[in-house]
Image (tube, helix red, strand yellow):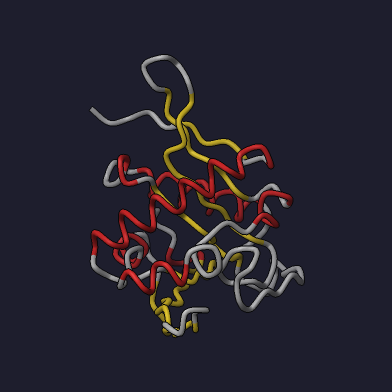
Amino acid sequence: MKAAFQLRPATEEDIPALRALIEASVRGLCAEAGDYTPAQIEGALGTVLGLDTQLIRDRTYYIAEILDQNARARSAGCGGWSKRKTLFGADAGPGREPELLDPATDAAKVRAIFVHPHFARQGLGSLILSTVEHAARTAGFKRFEMGSTLTGVPLYRLKGYMEIGRIAVPLKNGEALPVVKMVKSAEDWRS
């Protein structure tokens, strides 16, 4: 039986839960997939892989919840989109570009989609991505761009994204994290 997830815009009160969720996702799913070394994961958490609170302030970041047996909401996933130039990364991440994008000429940035390992492979990543794309389309964007983890690439390819390059992001511990730049346009929408 598939779980019933509810998505809502994230608020500042959700920040501690979101940080814990992102860390659990990265430590669980990226490690399980073998896409990154433990040193890369440790170096990337909180900078390249983490929460960008600007998305919460912009009301473009979502938290997915599921009710537990006591009818309490439990964080299962998160993700968002941005109308700003920053492609990826947390508040302390590299390459911060807070300037606003023009929906007529720029691609919305799909940002920071993470799923808790307990809810992986249940369609939650697809649900978050679909929600994010719909919201960005409603705001006038016709194209999407993202900096994906290696772990996320198979899902995004399945949803019509094409790889256009790779970025080796230097980490504070001397490691580098491969990030895959991917794009999708209106002609490719099949999510």
Q: Position of residue 1 (x, y in %)?
A: 23, 27
- Above or below 109: residue 64: above
- Above or below 91: residue 74: above
In front of the other: 19 or 162: 19
Residue 142 appears in the rendering: no
In front of the other: 94 or 1: 94
Residue 128 appears in the rendering: yes
Q: Position of residue 168 (x, y in %)?
A: 44, 85
Is 84 left, or right, of 151 in this rendering?
right
Q: Position of residue 147 (x, y in %)?
A: 48, 72
Q: At x 43% / y 23%, what residue is drawn?
A: 67
Seen from this angle, which residue lies furthest front? 173
Q: At x 47% / y 20%, what residue is drawn?
A: 72
Q: Position of residue 136 (x, y in %)?
A: 61, 55
Number of dots carrying numbers: 0
In front of the other: 119 or 172: 172
Q: At x 67% / y 74%, what residue is drawn?
A: 96
When asked about the image quadrant of residue 82, the answer is: bottom right
- Above or below 114: residue 44: below
In front of the other: 184 or 187: 184
